[in-house]
Amino acid sequence: VELALQFIFHGMALFNDGWLVFDFIIIAVSYGLSSFTIVRAFRIFRALRLLTRVEVMKNLVSALLSVIPGMASIALLLSLVFYIFAVMFTSLFKDLWRDGDGPLEFNYFGTIWDSLFTCFQFMTL
């Protein structure tokens, strides 16, 4: 019933608005596959329809989606910095552990992967 009312009210413009398409898909999936128990668990996503109904929530989600390219650029830059420091630390400290009399109990900088993980640990202390 709800799908029919939306289609009557919006017509073909229903498929032009991304929010209405999202709402349409959630309703269609939840009603069409309601006999499967696994699909019933996905009915919680009907709460996401709140995003399509409240204008403030639409604005919030739109703002969050518009920030994603900038965040991806920052993540790429941070990954590059991590890699540069990992290569530098690996070349400087990889032999410190192999001497046997070094101060380290574990080879934190033996490979690039170990150095990346150690740099990540340093940054998230």
Image (cartoon, rainbow, N blue to C red):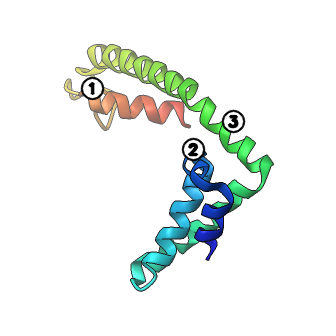
Q: CA distance from mark 3 to mark 2?
A: 20 Å
The amino acid type, in three-letter code, at marker 3 is Ala
Q: Which residue is mark 2?
A: 16
Residue 100, image x, y percentages: 21, 29
Residue 117, image x, y percentages: 37, 34
**Tag 1 and tag 3, C-beta contact below 8 Å:** no
The amino acid type, in three-letter code, at marker 2 is Asn
Residue 10, image x, y percentages: 65, 55
The amino acid type, in three-letter code, at marker 1 is Ile
Residue appearing at x 70%, y 61% in the figure: 50
Q: Which residue is mark 1?
A: 112
Which is nearer the eye, 102 or 122?
A: 122
Q: Dot 1: what SS?
A: helix
Sequence-first tag of 3 and 2: 2
Check the image and report above or below for 90 versus 25: above
Q: CA distance from mark 1 to mark 3?
A: 37 Å
Drawn side of residue 80 relative to residue 73, left or right: left
